[in-house]
Image (spheres, rainbow, N blue to C red):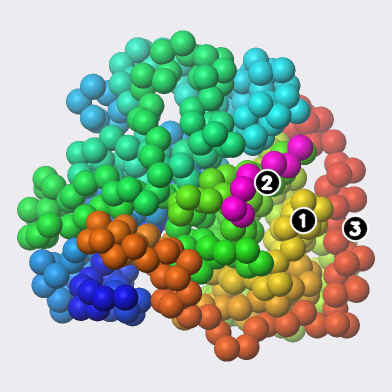
Amino acid sequence: MGQKNLVAVGIDSGTQGTKVVIVNFKGEVLARGYAPHPSPTGHLPGEKEQNPRDWVKALSKALQQALRQSHISPREIVCLGVSAQQHGFVPLDRDGQPLRPAKLWNDTSTVVETEEIRLALGGKKRFIKKVGIHLAVGYTASKILWMKKHEPHNFRQLKTILLPHNYLNFVLTGAIHMEYGDASGTGLMDIRQRAWHKEVLQAIDSHLEQKLPPLTHPLYPIGYVAGPIKNDFNLDKVLVSAGGGDNMMAAIGTGNTKANLATLSLGTSGTIFAYAPRPIIDSRGEIAAFCDSTGGWLPLLCTMNVTNTTEKIKQLLNLSNQDLEKLAALAPPGSEGLMFLPFLDGERVPEIPLATGAFIGLTQRTFSLPYLVRAVLEGTIFNLGYGWARMKQLKINPSEIRVTGGGAKNKTWLKIAASILNCPLFTLAENEAAAYGAALQSIWTYLYEQGEKVPIQELTENLVKKSSSPVEPEPGLTSLYSELQKKFNLTWQSIPWESLQAIE
């Protein structure tokens, strides 16, 4: 691959903040920046909202920080890619301004609207059969219907619907655009045909398609950086790739662009996903049949509660990440039966949006800091373990898992995950997989534009570096955790969540 001295930028706009990496065409990270976002707000139960303008401010701060650290000239940058949190709803007026705060991926205030859309297509099973994906609470479709019902004054002014990464691309280039990968997480798209699903759109509003951008293959760029960002940073001609959702970009950033691999992301949410050359449709709707951001598909498991739970216990007990790891190592595997249900934000898989968290099995012995901390770490992975079993039923059975996200730095957590999932885990040289993947996608797009048609699989094989030795499952623990997984499943299945919510 030529063009070795050129530079790309990868941006990942997540729930908690924006990360930027500056990468050369050898795949080396030259510098990085970070700026936090204000915490999500909301007035209603389950509501999680952020102001899209805060994402733009964080992008500028993080990019400025990375450029200062890199000591390169901004005019050396030739391409840029954007990753962002999936499923968000960014409604724009005719002037391209946000009408209201964006409703986020973990907003569960649209349970009623989700069910209305499902029923309009004949119920959950028929929706999956027609569209190819289950409409989960938190997907964009129900947020649009929510605005139509609850904020008709805003809906009347609605001109354009974007996802978070599309909004940032719009700010960067002025182009209204969507690609297959992130769009597949809206619940509005025919997954098999990779086109807007007319019946779903009609169930929400007869004029909805006019407010949605056309869909394009993720290889195609959307334009060049223009306007304030170009001027503020003295950029030259910077090609902007299609970008994608954070999971789609993390797939690229972990080299998960071919069969027999999976990626585990231990972030605010937890995801496990794998590359597929064709759609893998789950009739139960637990594994999402997303498209990826390379032109293939990305069967994906998503749980809503991972580092949000560890951050809570750290804040409560004034612990550092190092404290968390040391304390968990002091308690025995299985925490002597102490179990943590990590449903602090409800849950997507299993689909129990009204669920809450709980410690179960407290005794005089287990009511101690090491046991509580270890139970939290184990509980988040047992929650993923439920969906992991479903992936295997769908014949998704990778031989290795590549792990990324903040939780990947906790060695005790990785040992727990390897034994519960019963699969080797590889860490990566670059842990910010979504930002890194966005940079790699932009390099891929730039090379194609220059006539150098490098397959994405070849690009990631050359540039993504994994650890030389994996974290292996421990034979003595896999059987223990297998039994505890059954107990975990039976525990949440036996709780009447809707009845408990009604009591509140």
Marks 2 and 1 close (CB-CB < 8 Å): yes
> 84 above or below 111?
below
Q: Residues within 10 Å of mark 3 (few under 14, many from 20)?
A: some
Q: SS at mark 2?
A: loop
Q: Disc 2 versus disc 3: distance between alpha carbons?
A: 29 Å
Q: Position of residue 266 (x, y in %)?
A: 58, 64
**Residue at mark 1:** 395
Q: SS at mark 1?
A: loop
Looking at marks 2 and 1 on the same chain, the residue that comes earlier in the sequence is marked by: 2
The tag on residue 70 is none
What type of secondary structure mainly makes up the magenta span? loop
| Pair 2/3: label in front | 2
State which quadrant residue 335 falls in: bottom right
Q: Residue at x 81, y 30 (%)?
A: 499
Q: Residue at x 90, y 58 (%)?
A: 487
* Magenta span: 276-283
Q: Quadrant of the N terminus?
A: bottom left
Q: Disc 2 versus disc 1: distance between alpha carbons?
A: 9 Å
Amino acid tagged 2: Ile
Amino acid tagged 3: Lys
Amino acid tagged 1: Lys
The tag on residue 280 is 2
Q: SS at mark 3?
A: helix
State which quadrant residue 94 falls in: top left
- Residue 462 lies in the magenta-colored region: no
Q: Does the image show residue 280? A: yes
Viewer-side residue, 463 vs 247: 463
Q: Does the image show residue 368? A: no
Q: Position of residue 189 (x, y in %)?
A: 53, 31
**Residue at mark 3:** 487
> 54 above or below 190?
below
Q: Quadrant of the C terminus?
A: top right
